[in-house]
Amino acid sequence: MISCQEKEAKTEAPWILDRFDDIKVLRYEVPGFAELPLEEKELIYYLSEAAKCGRDILFDQNFKYNLPIRRTLEVIYENYEGDRETAEWKALEKYLKKVWFANGIHHHYSNDKFTPEFSREYFLEVTESIPLEKFGDELNALRAVVCEAIFNPDLYRTGLNQTEGEDLIVTSSNNFYEGVTQAEVEDFYHKMVDADDPTPISYGLNSKLVKDENGEIRERVWKVGGMYSPAIEKIVYWLRKAQEVAKEPQKSTIGALIAYYETGDLREFDRYNVLWVKDTISNVDFVNGFIEDYGDPLGRKASWESVVNFMDKEACHRTEIISDNAQWFEDHSPVDSAYKKEVVKGVSAKVITAAILGGDCYPATPIGINLPNADWIRKEYGSKSVTIDNITYAYDKAAQGNGFLEEFMLRAEDRDRIAKYGKLADDLHTDLHECLGHGSGQLAPGVRGNELRNYTSTLEEARADLFGLYYLGDEKMVELGLIPSLDVAYAEYAKYIMNGMMTQLSRIEPGKNVEEAHMRNRKMICEWCYERGKAENVIEWVNQDGKSYIVVNDYAKLRDLFGQMLREVQRIKSEGDYEAGKALVETYAVKVDPELHSEVLERYAALDIEPYAGFVNPEYELVMDGDKIVDVKVSYPNNYVEQMLEYSRDYSFLPNLN
């Protein structure tokens, strides 16, 4: 296999392909693909096609008018014959790039609606300059709706509202619910849940909940023959092609996923998840479906996503060590013994090379994944975790030399540690977070797992982060040969505290609170540890030359604080203690100091770097000899706009309104 480090010498293309607003678009490569057996290359090709077919689903899930908005803007972009050098045209072009990146008109992280930097009058002028037939009858009929959605600041202000005390369903603009209130949603699913079922399905995961014209509340299930059927049919077509070349046990796993898509039956989804988590031998693997529920304020509805990957066998050595010692980590966790698993089952972890990103993993993507999400499956069958090495490598290469650490990290010794160990520290924290953190612990008898409601995602990410932070600083990591010294942990601690308390504020608009679950998690951990460590000056604010810095003075005591907080967060989850979870999040995770925020934004702007990054996908092409497939070639496009237009042209299967 070709490692990520070796691939650097093989390319002349830049890592950063495009820059706009607060975003940079990067390239990633797929080292080792050329050396895969033909049947695995072919499998990746078919799974990659399936991954691209769900793109419209995510746009529609994020907001009911996203598809007509995107398509209207694309018609304008491809057909406008006027001056493309004016400030307003450039602003419209940037807006379209942002819509592509966010899979809709709400920011992919903050969930705030984009504010156009071009006028309504200009938009109408440009639109009216294009022949009506270019839009088609349906888009023309929706023109007024599109215009209001884009330009009326009082409509659809946030895709995801988590403000305590407000109706989180009515005030969120996502397309998971229509015509219902938060109380009605909670009552609907409360009546549906079987409290005595030891293997509960994920109620509501794959449906939109609506109130019809008769006042009846019902689910519109996402399946073949149901909502999103045209796109799901295409996904199933490519999954069948993949099933034809897959070997057991993966052939059966793909079959179970197809059955789930065809029926919409969540028992079939659980059957698929059990087969998937038990398959630890397939080199090529994938995620495809309605998976993560971060986009739903009540944590029920799942966004569509896909990742296709294969193992980085050399890098997997470290995750194999972690997996093999999962019971030791569980036994030595600082949490209450009542909430530890007596026997850790089925924990597997690997380092992977991403071959394609789709849906909610594209263009912005996670760097690690731990699935399945159902607590009972984790307990009975375990979980699979991955760290995506070629993605973290691309991030690392794109960040080199940008001046960020020099600007925000005060002490040279901390910067030196990060320069030496930063990539290893990040990767290991991700490994521990995904492999053991999410898979650790257990619920108390009678707790179902959804008691924390709108705070579930933040607290679960905090639990996994804390697990990783605590154990990264354990001498066991040195003993296992995973790190040369605890300096690796100290590099991660310094960067984590700086990010959680300070630099992640660069991602938030002035006057806004922290809303995104991962950002809330990091802020909550850091602020809690800062407050609890004040008496011993564990973490300290320092002002030097008129600039604020946050420094860690005692890494050992900070690790102890991580352990104390992990114990409490695990208790909250295990007991379903909503009030304690709410207090923790609302006290430490939400509010932003406006003076510090202003300073961070000013210093960040001076660096001329973007706080968010995403990717252009590689492209795969079948090589034919007559009607026989003899190879699959991979290439690396370097144009963000062209790929987005290509995907909209070739992988757009849903009507404008669904």
Image: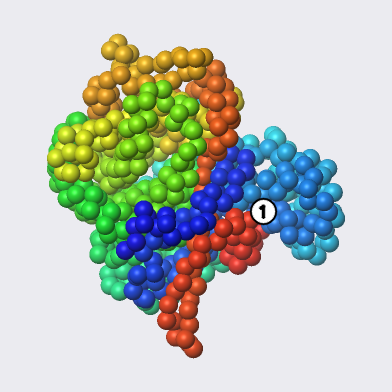
Q: Residues within 10 Å of mark 1 (few under 14, many from 20)?
A: many
Residue at x-position 26% and y-position 32%: 487
Secondary structure beneath label 1: helix
| Residue drawn where x is 31% and y is 60% of the image | 311
Please state, as top left, top right, bottom left or bottom right, where the C terminus lies in the image.
bottom right
Q: Is residue 287 visible?
A: no
The foreground one among 123 and 192 is: 123
Q: Is residue 437 left or right of residue 167?
A: left
Dividing the picture into quadrants, the one containing residue 552 is: top left
Viewer-side residue, 303 vs 574: 303
Residue 549 lies, with reference to residue 216, above or below; the image says above
In screen coordinates, is 141 left or right of 10? right
Q: How is the image coloured?
A: rainbow
| Percent of width and height locating residue 115 | 68, 37
Residue at mark 1: 70
Which x, y percent locates residue 154?
69, 34
Residue 560 in the image: above or below residue 86: above
Q: Is residue 10 visible?
A: yes
Of residue 330 and residue 175, the one placed in the foreground of this image is 330
Give the x, y percent position of residue 196: 28, 47
Residue 405: x and y in percent read 44, 31
Which kind of residue does numbered mark 1 sit on?
A: Arg
Name which residue lies at 69% across and 51% down: 69
Q: Residue at x 50, y 57 (%)?
A: 12
| Residue that protrudes farthest toward the bottom in the picture | 626
